[in-house]
Image: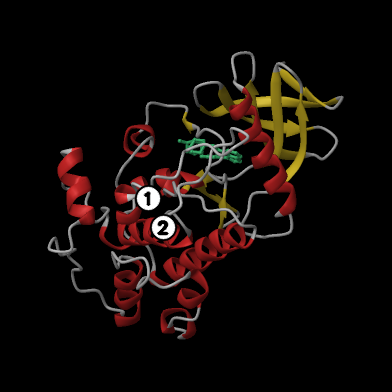
Amino acid sequence: KDVITVNKVTYTILRIIGKGGSSKVYQVFSENKKKVLAIKYVKLDCADDMTVQGYINEITLLQKLRNSENIIHLYDFEITDSHIYLVMECGSIDLATFLSKHKKIDPQDMKFYWRGMLDAVDVVHQAGIVHSDLKPANFLFVEGTLKLIDFGIANAIQSDKTSVVRESQVGTLNYMSPEAIQDTSPSPQVDANGHRRPKLKINCKSDVWSLGCIFYYMVYGKTPFQHITLSLMKLQAICDPRHVIEFPAVDNPHLLDLLKKCLIRDPRERPSIPELRKHPYFLSEA
Ligand SMILES: CN1CCC(Oc2ccc(-c3[nH]nc4cccc(OCC5CCCCC5)c34)cc2)CC1
């Protein structure tokens, strides 16, 4: 029986959920908790200091946000020179895989999912972090509630199978905001003590754009610029106000209005997450 031991506690490996460059996510069974959990294993042998720092920041943030219901729960972790183990909550399916299987989503469920995603990203912003790479694979269903799996600080993990998730999710431009593309701020990419400085122009509003692209995908089955396959053309269209994003008719006018507001190209015009949470779409029962 394959087991993983973290801080002298053994977990039985049930199966592998996903793997990235130097990381793997296992579904495990905890003997003493009698629960199915997930363990993220990161091989540190050839990791540079910045990568390790990225993971330490991720762990610190997971601990800081442990009481937020829309953030995945970190039960335990172990860091040595050769590896990192993160013992976390195990979900049933990530949003990317879910959306590739369900083209139509019930309007009530949709509202519940959108509320959860906004709340998840809002607590990250309140902790002073901008994700800047939000996409469906970052969200996970845990007993029907959508939770954020990572904060975009450490490297991403793709699905284990060569599933539709991996091709369409890793390094995708489909969720990139105009200001992220145009961000040519002269600020050096690293600050005085060599820490990677977040680009100045990317801020919380960039995450609102990415969420808007995810919401758009949930409503229309494709992201706003998915049909433009040439990367350079796609980037230009995202930035070009003359390229009008299409919003086919939907039943709920509040939903359409919220969607359009998330995809306003000027980040100053684009609403913040607290403003979006007060939108009529979330107030009405229907
Ligand atoms: C394709 N197939 C995969 C298994 C299953 O989906 C998941 C189940 C559990 C999970 C997960 N739980 N806790 C998790 C804690 C951290 C990371 C996690 O995933 C990382 C990465 C896995 C691949 C998809 C993107 C997210 C975690 C995630 C996907 C059904 C779909």
Q: Is residue 180 visible?
A: yes
Q: Nearer the viewer, residue 128 or 108?
A: 128
**The C terminus: image quadrant:** bottom left
Quarter where residue 239 is shown:
bottom left
Between disc 1 and disc 2, whose residue precedes? 1
Residue 62 x %, y %: 69, 47
Residue placed at 63% from the left, 34% from the top? 193
Q: Nearer the viewer, residue 225 or 14?
A: 225
Quarter where residue 241 is shown:
bottom left
Per the image, the residue denoted by label 2 is 206
Label 1 close to label 2 by CB (< 8 Å):
no
**The N terminus: image quadrant:** top right
Quarter where residue 254 is shown:
bottom left
Residue placed at 36% from the left, 36% from the top? 171
Q: Seen in the image, is 26 located left or right of residue 64?
A: left
Q: Is residue 278 above or below residue 161?
A: below
Per the image, the residue denoted by label 1 is 99
Amino acid on which disc 1 is placed: Leu
Disc 1 crowd rating (10 Å Cα; few below 14, some 14-19, many 20+) is some
Q: Nearer the viewer, mark 1 or mark 2?
A: 2
Amino acid on which disc 2 is placed: Ser
Residue placed at 30% from the left, 55% from the top? 178
Residue 9 x %, y %: 84, 28
